[in-house]
Amino acid sequence: KFRLFRDILNVLIISEVTMNADILYTFENGARYFRCPICKGKVALKKQSLVCANNHSFDIAKQGYINYIMGKKQFKNYDKESFESRKAILDKGFYSHILENLIGIIEGLSKCTSILDVGCGEGYYARNIVEATDKDVIAFDISKDSVQLAARSDSTHGVAWFVGDLSQLPIKD
């Protein structure tokens, strides 16, 4: 089912600016969970953007994320360098015991079909959860640098990555 959808997307976007079909599928799935942060309306995937009925459009960046923060500056000391350092520490396994326990808890949630990682940082937990479980994973952080790093590091394109203000997440009710 997923492969057929991905193959159809690949054919449909051949004449467009090509984007990985897995990334587009992830955001098609993500549209089930989100609303427009401006008008609160329903969003749908149109080409390479999530768009509402009022034509508020949120493009999928080539790195594979959507930025829901409009015109806000990023905090100092919450930058690319700090997230790259954190990623290096996490990738060496210093926190793998926490990840293993978290995955064990998630696997025990049989009725749960999706996981929201709020404050995902460089995406270590979200990436590993999507690889280890059958859950949809949606990840937010207020730092564009961290989400860019997370999306670039997501070789499976299994996580829907968003830059967003945690106090104003555009989640459907």
Image: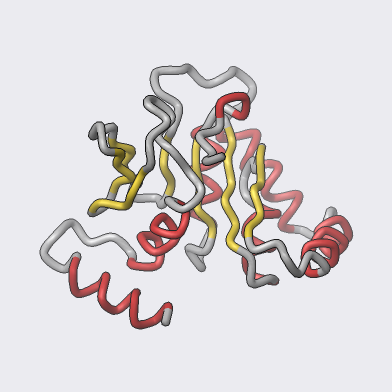
Say how many tags the image has.
Answer: 0
Image location (x, y in percent) of residue 124: 67, 53
Q: Residue at x 49, y 42 (%)?
A: 162
Residue situated furthest front in the rendering: 173
Q: Quadrant of the C terminus?
A: top right
**Residue situated in front as seen by the camera: 148 or 112:** 112
- 31 to the left or right of 81: left
Counting from the top left corner in percent of width and height, residue 160 is at: 50, 53
Q: Nearer the viewer, residue 110 or 64?
A: 110
71 w.r.t. 50: above or below: above
Q: Residue at x 28, y 32 (%)?
A: 56
Q: Is residue 17 left or right of residue 106?
A: left
* Quarter of the rendering containing residue 166: top right
Q: Is residue 110 above or below residue 88?
A: below
**On the picture, is 14 further left or further right than 146?**
left
Give residue 86's quadrant in the image. top right
Q: How is the image coloured?
A: secondary structure
Residue at image x 64%, y 63%? Answer: 113
Position of residue 114 measured from the top left corner of the image (x, y, whole percent): 63, 58
Image coordinates for residue 132, horizontal then vertical, percent: 69, 71
Quarter occupied by the N terminus: bottom left
Residue at left offset 84%, top offset 64%: 100
* Residue 148, placed above or below residue 9: above
